[in-house]
Amino acid sequence: MTSLSPELQQVAQDFGLALRQHEAVQQYLQAVAELANNVEAQELDEHFETVRANLIARQRAGEDLPADEVQAFYALRDAVTANSLIENRDNALNMAKGYLANVGAELNRTLSLDFVTMALS
């Protein structure tokens, strides 16, 4: 891994802090904090992610999932999507991702670089 100069590290840190101040990122951070402050919603979200990951892994391993487990998962998914704190966090995350993708695209255009292609080649 390449070592960055202290000046470049500082500029990158300042850039990250500036990005963090954008409204979309602030809304996401606020939504995450609100979710973290609600134990019931947080546990529901964590349980859903655990169940989802487990079912995906089992399905990828070739297991036929029992219908009752699939139905239980759908009921859990419905509970998650009905939770306003989780919905707000997910919506805010999508907005923040869109903003950061636009920033990345603008950097690529301005610098005539494609960081994703560079990283993958």
Image (spheres, grey):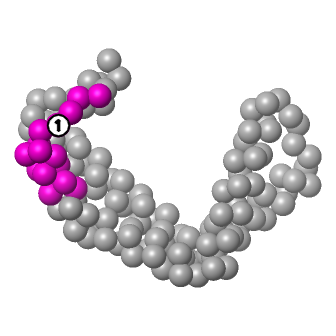
Q: Is residue 3 magenta?
A: yes
Name the residue tied to disc 1.
4
Q: Residue at x 83, y 52 (%)?
A: 70
Q: Is residue 17 left or right of residue 97?
A: left
Residue plotted at (16% across, 29% down) = 113
Q: Which quadrant of the figure contains the C terminus?
A: top left
Q: Nearer the viewer, residue 73 or 10?
A: 10
* Image location of residue 8, percent across then percent down: 11, 43
Residue 99 horizontal/vertical position (percent): 28, 55
Residue in the picture at 13% in, 51% down: 10
Q: Nearer the viewer, residue 1 or 75?
A: 1
Q: Taken as a whole, is the magenta stretch helix, strand or loop?
A: helix
Could you tell me if residue 15 is visible in this image? no
- Viewer-nearest residue: 12 or 30: 12
Q: Quadrant of residue 71?
A: bottom right
Residue type, label 1: Leu
Count the labels in the image.
1
